[in-house]
Image (cartoon, helix red, strand yellow):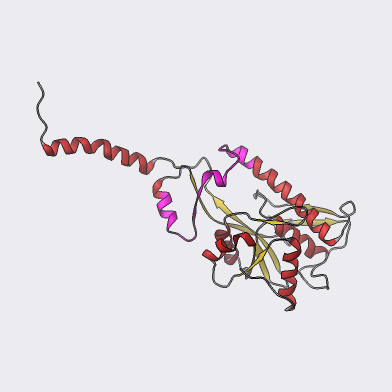
Amino acid sequence: MFSRLTRPQALAVSAVPVVALLATAVFAPLPFSVAQPGQTTNVLGQDKGTQVITISGAPTRKTSGQLRMTTIVATSPDVRVTLPNLVDSWFRTDRAVMPRDAVYPSGDSVKEIQRHNAEQMRESQNAATRAALGYLGRDPEDVKVTLKLADVGGPSAGLLFSLGIIDKLDGDGSGGDLTGGRNIAGTGTITADGTVGAVGGVPLKTQAARRDGATVFLVPKAECGDAQAELPKGLRLIPVTTLKGAVNALVALETGKGPVPSC
């Protein structure tokens, strides 16, 4: 024999699975990563006691100023990101919620991702060297460039590597520094022919750059809008599409002669 539930009892019983579902939704891992501003490194100097750019087979210059490559730090693919994490990060300007596949396209294994990022860094360094030497008309058979950067992967430092090589070998082409003594940061991939490509995470990278003293930021032109969205006060954006364009913009900024592009 069955007894009839009262209305309050029925509501209480039906609420149990709803609460359970809500709790599951709140604490279930979601396919997102949370990113924040990462380290910046002056490619004209040292990283963890090792010179970032070493050149042999050609005389090099003593440089002043800084050329800072920038990074973001994202939650590891093996870290559980839940709804409360996303809600907290969504309303912070120093955080970004990104699809995990966009951050880690090579898969979910940490080792696999590390291998992928290391390979991208090697390819970026090779392309950066070829682009810089090609721009200067130097023979890669005579000039040997070694690039070392610890604990950083991916291709986004390519532009800054190329500019660092050029500054060490030729400066602004007239005896001065390519930086003009400034603290200049930036980001962008590069190909051997000097084409600069987009990278992602630019709003966070501009924050990292300004935090570490940069006053100028070189940004792939296609990402001007992203860079302007959360631009820190005191940081000037210079959009670039090619290595030659980046060099010309820095020389114009230093000398005050010629136009300096802006977003």
> Is 252 on the left or on the right of 116, as rendered?
right
Above-or-below relation of 113 to 128: above
- Residue at point 56%, 52% (across, down): 73
Above-or-below relation of 128 to 169: above
Magenta segment: does it hold 54?
A: no
- Residue at point 62%, 37% (across, down): 112
- Residue at point 84%, 62% (across, down): 136
Q: Position of residue 211 (x, y in %)?
A: 57, 65
Residue found at the far bottom of this picture: 256
Please identify the quarter of the rendering in which residue 8 is found.
Answer: top left
**Residue 168 is at least partly visible in this image:** yes
- Residue at point 69%, 72% (across, down): 182
Please identify the quarter of the rendering in which residue 167 is found.
Answer: bottom right
Which portion, as a residue range, is magenta? 85-114
Q: Quadrant of the C terminus?
A: bottom right
Q: Position of residue 20 (x, y in %)?
A: 29, 37
Q: Position of residue 44 (x, y in %)?
A: 73, 62
**Residue 230 is at least partly visible in this image:** no
> Is 218 on the left or on the right of 51, as rendered?
left
Q: Quadrant of the N terminus?
A: top left
Magenta segment: does it hold 102?
A: yes
Residue sitting nearer the eye, 242 or 20: 242
Q: Position of residue 235 (x, y in %)?
A: 59, 70
